[in-house]
Amino acid sequence: MPMFLREFSSWMLRYRRTWKSTIVISVANPLLFLVAIGAGLGQLVDPSSLGGLTYLEFFAPGILAAAAMQNAYIEAAFVVHGSLRQDKSYLVAAATPLEPRDIMAGHMLFMAFRIGTSALAFAAVMAALGATRSPWAVLTVPAALLTGMAFAAPLAAWTVTVGRFGALNTVFRFVLMPMYLFSGTFFGIETLPDWLRPLAYVLPLWHGVDLCRTLSLGTATLLTSAIHVGYLAALTAGGVAVALVTYRRHIHV
């Protein structure tokens, strides 16, 4: 068995004991958003203002991508920081034949598992509520997984370098939350002021939102989807490349 799979199996063993506690924040919270805003408040939105879409159809794929980002943040920020600075499970693993790259790869594989399974559950509820319009909606699950990993990999690479826990909250408040609000999750970014719109187009979450939304509605084109996938994949690959360096520098025994 490759060494990084040993690290992954340890995370899965731990998750067997803790999975119930993760359901609320990973799945239940986004679903409550989906039901309350999409099917409740959304009834007040005139479909003609959304090109004939119901607000639930517009909103659901956006919140799917945003939930993937949120789950990525939890795993790559809080859990990584705790693994190195608090319970020190990273250091324990490093005392075994595992190399830092194995620890990084095994944990990121577990992050992908967490983000992917949460996205699968969310997409199933979307379909059950009639929030999708196309068979291509099945691809929203890998799209959400890619969106989540585009955040998880760079975040994990950075988090192992952070000594002060408060820095994680600062990033959440001043980076992730604005991105959450201005990436087209709740409203189309074409309604933003002209000076703000170009900034929104470069936000990684917007690429995830637009990819999930166009797949869910059956309006995806090959070119735009390729741009979204390429952008998110580049962020993921870049994050992994940096993580290989930061994990090696900060995990020593």
Image (tube, rainbow, N blue to C red):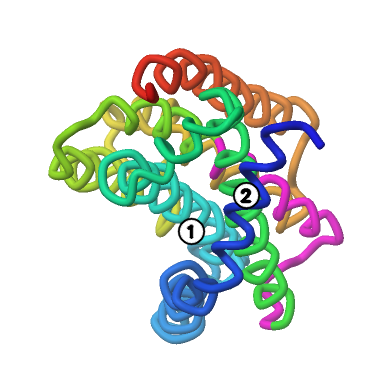
Q: Earlier in the sequence, mark 1 or mark 2?
A: 1
* Magenta portion: prevailing SS class: helix
At label 2, the amino acid type is Ala
Q: Position of residue 46 (x, y in %)?
A: 47, 74
What residue is disc 2 on? 144
| 249 or 172, nearer to the observer | 249
Q: Residue 146 magenta-drawn? A: yes
Q: Which residue does the image show at 71% across and 57% down from the upper left?
A: 216
| Residue 221 location, quadrant | top right
Which quarter of the rendered picture does the N terminus lie within? top right
**Can you see residue 213?**
no
Specify the label residue 173 is tagged with: none
Which quarter of the rendered picture does the C terminus lie within? top left
At label 1, the amino acid type is Ala
| 44 or 1, nearer to the observer | 1
Tag 1 near tag 2, CB within 8 Å: yes
Specify the label residue 67 is tagged with: 1
- Magenta residues span 129-149
Q: Position of residue 177 (x, y in %)?
A: 27, 49
